[in-house]
Amino acid sequence: MQPDSPGSVYQSCTFRRFGCLRCEAPRVCLEHEPYETGIRIARLAFGNHTMNAVAASLPACVVVVMGVSGSGKTLVATLLAERLDSEFADADAFHSAASLHKLRSGNPLTDRDRGPWLRALAAWIDAVCSEGKRGVLACSALKRSYRETLTAGRDGVRLVYLKGDAELIARRMKQRHGHFMPSALLQSQLDTLEEPQADENPIVVSIDTDPGEIVAEIIAELEK
């Protein structure tokens, strides 16, 4: 959707007033603006509108928003959870202190490192579903085996894969400040990534657009 096309969120004065301050794009520019600004702008564009009726009708109990670091998982998952009035969790918060230290030092995690982390995430999913709630989880879920830990025996879990060009993601990561994941680890994540296949029933969304459009596309796919 182009900036001035009918129905585009770009038509909102919010986007024109708070467009990227570095490249003057009349949109949320994830290459330049920090995460908090992207959240603020998208919230202003959406207002306080949630979709409780839609959320109640969705077959998915938990939506896992996955992708490599820098793809916008936390931003998109946060906004999606707000739109669907659902619980939100960031998988980064489930890492052990030792794993976080390892990542900050520029060392990728091993499958052994990720085991307890994935089991903790699966427990969170089970808790949300067993309590009759709905949730959105931002999680890299790079390998199929990782995703199977989260989805095996859980029909109510749906994957959303944020797919993007490596060069675009690298530019975004270089603009981030204070994040524990150094941009130097991007190539390691790309090498580890096993894109979800058709039998995993993923929703695949391009990140080369603004968060509002991404969230709207995800919701439209969830409703099908």
Image (tube, grey):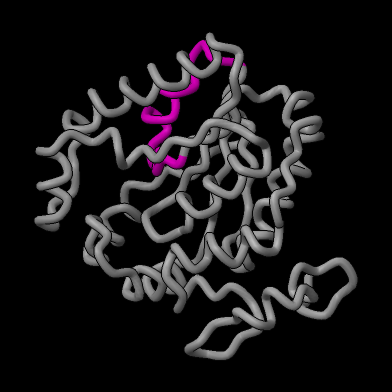
Above or below, 204 relative to 135? below
As for residue 142 lying within the magenta part, the answer is yes
Residue ranking furthest to the front: 48
**10 sits to left or right of 19:** right
Q: Nearer the viewer, residue 211 or 205?
A: 211
Q: Is residue 85 above or below residue 218?
A: above
Q: Is residue 115 left or right of residue 66?
A: left
Name the residue rendered at 76%, 38% in the picture: 51
Locate residue 182, reporting x and y percent: 22, 62
Describe residue 210's horizontal placement relative to residue 40 as left or right: right
The percent coordinates of residue 56 (x first, y second) are 75, 24
Residue at 81% across, 34% down: 224
Classify residue 173 as left or right of residue 202. Answer: left
> Which of the pair 3/51 is nearer the observer?
51
| Position of residue 200 measured from the top left corner of the image (x, y, whole percent) | 58, 30
Above/below status of 170 relative to 64:
below
Residue ID at (51%, 18%): 128
- Residue at horizontal 13 percent and vertical 52 percent from the top: 107
Tell which residue pokes out farthest to the right in this image.
6
Q: Position of residue 159 (x, y in %)?
A: 56, 35
Which is more toward the observer, 19 or 112?
19
Stretch of the chain drawn in magenta: 138-155
- Foreground pick, 34 / 214: 34
Count of numbered tags: 0
Q: Quadrant of the N terminus?
A: bottom right
Location of residue 208 by image quarter: bottom right
* Quadrant in the rendering for residue 206: bottom right
- Report if residue 52 lies within the magenta region: no
